[in-house]
Every structure is written in C-alpha cells, then in structure tokens.
Amino acid sequence: MADQSTPGTSAPSARKAPTPEESPGTPPSAGSPTGVMSRRRLLGTAGATGLALGAAGAAVGYAAAPAPVKTVPLTSVGADMAMFHGKHQPGITTALQARGHLVAFDLTAGSGRREAAALLRRWSVTAERLMAGEAAAHEDTDVARDAGPSSLTVTFGFGHSFFSRTGLEKQRPLALDPLPDFSSDRLDKARSDGDLWVQIGANDALVAFHALRAIQKDAGAAARVRWQMNGFNRSPGATTEPMTARNLMGQIDGTRNPKPSEPDFDGRIFVPASGTPEWMANGSYAVVRRIRMLLDDWEKLSGKAQEDVIGRKKSDGAPLSGGTETTPMDLDKTDADGNLIVPVNAHARITRPDQNGGAAMLRRPFSFHDGIGADGTPDAGLLFVCWQADPVRGFVPVQRKLDRGDALSTYIRHESSGLFAVPGGAAEGEYVGQRLLEG
C-alpha cells in the first residue's frame, strides 16, 4: 500500500471502439441474425453520440468525464476500448478499472511447452476479440452480448514454476527468483504463486466476468485454476471530478505513483529492449499480494489517529505537514512541542522513494470484500498489484522498510503472494509469450 498514485487515463492503449466503416473487414458477432444490429455496429452508433472517457481524465486514477458534466451516457463507458497489440501488454498503464479478476493457473500433468504455447495462442486470440467488444471465437456465453468493450484488458504472466514445467529453466529471469520472507507475512500457499497468471479488468462487471469465463474455458485440459481473486474500484463518473482512488480504509491511496509522463518512468517500470532475457524486452514484473485490512480494529481509531498512521489527511490526501494532495511532504516539520508533524513510522513517510534509495513501483490495485471471515470480521482489503522493471529494486526494498516499523502493519495482514514475469506486448500476428515459447 505504498504512497503512490494511480496511473493516468491517457495511456495510448485506449481508444473509442471503431465503427463498422472504420473496420470494414470485421465480421458480425457470432450468432447475430441477419437484420439485427451487431454489437460492433451498436457500439459504433453509441460511440458517435456518447463520450469516450478513456482520454478524458489524464493523470488521474479513473477514466472519468471532465467536470462539470450533468449526465454521462451509459454508452460512453461501454465504448471505451484498450488495444491488445502494442509495445507493452494492456492493463499496466491502463487507468484503474471498476472491476477486476486475478487468476493463477497451474499446468496439468502431461502439459509442457507445446501445450503451453497452444494455450497462450488461444488466450491471445480470445483476449484480442473480447477487448474489441466481439464475441469469443468458440462457444461464447453471451454474458456480455449487449455491452461494448468497457475498457476490458487481459494481461498474462509467467510464474517461477512455469519454466521448470516447460523445460525452459535457462530462460527463467533472475528477477523472478522468489521474494524474500517478510515478518508480517501470513501467507496461504494455496492462494500464492502459480505457473501462469491472468489479470482481467473492465469498467463493467459482466464484461469482466465474461472474459474470466472465456479464459477459464480456453484453459481446457492444459491448465487448471490454482486460485482466483475478485476486486473492484470506484466506477468511472462516480465523483464530480477525477480524483485519486480511495481504499476500504477510507484513505486516498496512491498519491505518489510514478506517472507515464515522467522521463524515468519506462526505466523504472519496464524491462528495456536490450534487457535480459531477450524475450522480456518491454515487459514488466508484477508482484501480487492479497492484503487483508483489519477494518474492525482500524475503525475504532479516531480520525486523527488514522491520519497519524498514514501521514496524510483523510479528507483530501494532503500531507499532515500542510498543502494539498500533491504538495511535497515536509518530513522535518514539527509542532509547538517539537514533535514531528508526520510521525516517524507513518506509512507515507516510510514508502517515499527518497526514503528507500529511489525504489519505485507502479501500483494498480483492486479492493476486495469476500464476506465475513471465520473470526467474525470482514474478509476485506486490497488486491495489491505493483509493476516494476525489477522487483529487487522496486517492491523488495520498500517492503523490507515497512517490515521494520510501519504504523499501518498493525491493521493489515499479507495473506497471499505471487511474482510473475509479464512479457512485452504481442505484435500483430503474434501471441503473448511467443518469443519465449518458440524462441
């Protein structure tokens, strides 16, 4: 839960869905009867009259219409579309989406490199079609029949164990070595790691679920689900103006995220084109943690006590040292009695890059609520996902620092963990991971 802001919404991977005239070669959706308007044509009509929100809220956490807006057509959210092909995979710099699913798969007995390649080829075809607002190529469930792309993204990664299962140990990156143990970890091994990882995000719950089912069905006999986690964020247009996300503790969460506009962004988040191994060029490493928030204990604190734990005002995210959300934090400022305004163990102080040798990561989380746990408390918290060019220089130093005395650690519990190598985006005619599996 580092003190960093969500990625902007002006990522080049998002655009409004094309009309049929823009894509004359696109066939109608499977199962569409003659004379009935296809989903693509319906989407094109909606896009002409609605608002494409994907480029509206630059440098904020959500795709949202610029204020003031009196009404936001529902079709505007559905019309926003991310691109499957590109330099990087979608779902990394894409704006936070309202719904998300994180799923890990293990290859089944007898499945190796050949089966994995066929699976990634199927998954890539399905992801490309669904992200364009089209039906799955085979046995579509029709769950998203009436919806547009709704900013759907599907992102694929490989776990440490994938390489031994496929005989590709020599191609396993050093950066994928297992994360060190942290004293605050209470990890459930059954909900950690995995051979393959898929991140699904969309601004419509049915669109996200439709993609989830399609990906699960495509796994066939080659892989089985190891674990699945479901999350959410605030919906686009739910606030009067674009703003940084809030988490389930009520805190503005993510003020200091690195931004794509910063000159060193790519170097911090993506593996360079000349990086090692070659198949990871333009890729990134995702650390995934299920962080349960002990909300009953947290909510017993006064507002002032909560702000001292975080180091920022709950109302607007401004540092306790003064100013607005984006004002640099004055770590040396004291009160009349000589006490630090921002406590020495405040979460926002500890996670600052300048307090961790410049370590930075792009956080892109989802909140979760899975009912009431066996102890009678809310099973709720954060599906923490962070991206970096190397987790040893991104996530690890920050988490080690937090492990040594973060005030927030009393109110959270790390319950599962995973680290995945996410290759660069697939070029036209390629599938994700092809350079690894066929190299």
Image (tube, rainbow, N blue to C red):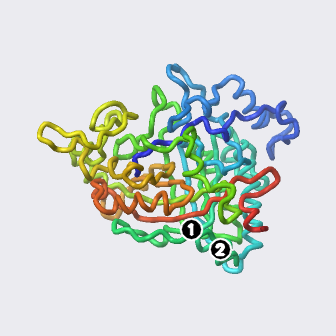
Q: In the image, is 386 to the left or to the right of 310?
A: right
Toward the left, the furthest residue is 337
Q: In the image, is 51 to the left or to the right of 352?
A: right
Q: Which mark is residue 176?
A: 1
Give the quarter of the figure containing the C terminus. bottom right
* Residue 29 sits in quarter: top right
* Distance from Cα at disc 2 to Cα at disc 1: 10 Å
Which amino acid, mark 1?
A: Leu
Q: Position of residue 431 (x, y in %)?
A: 76, 58
Q: Position of residue 420 (x, y in %)?
A: 57, 63
Pointers 2 and 1 in contact (C-beta within 8 Å): yes
Query: Which residue is at a point 68% across and 58% down the rendered structure image?
Result: 274
Nearer the observer, 102 or 217: 102
230 to 165, vertically: above or below:
above
Residue topped by disc 2: 163
285 to 238, vertically: above or below:
below
Q: Position of residue 385 (x, y in %)?
A: 50, 54
Disc 1 secondary structure class: helix
122 to 149, vertically: above or below:
below
Query: Which residue is at a point 72% across and 76% down the rendered structure image?
Result: 112
Tell me if mark 1 has few (under 14), some (14-19) or many (20+) residues whose alpha carbon lies within 10 angstroms of its own. some
Nearer the observer, 65 or 228: 65
Q: In the image, is 175 to the left or to the right of 238?
A: right
Answer with mark 2 or mark 1, whichever residue precedes in sequence. Answer: 2
277 to 4, vertically: above or below:
below
Q: Which mark is residue 22?
A: none
Query: Which residue is at a point 50% across and 44% down the rendered structure image?
Result: 258
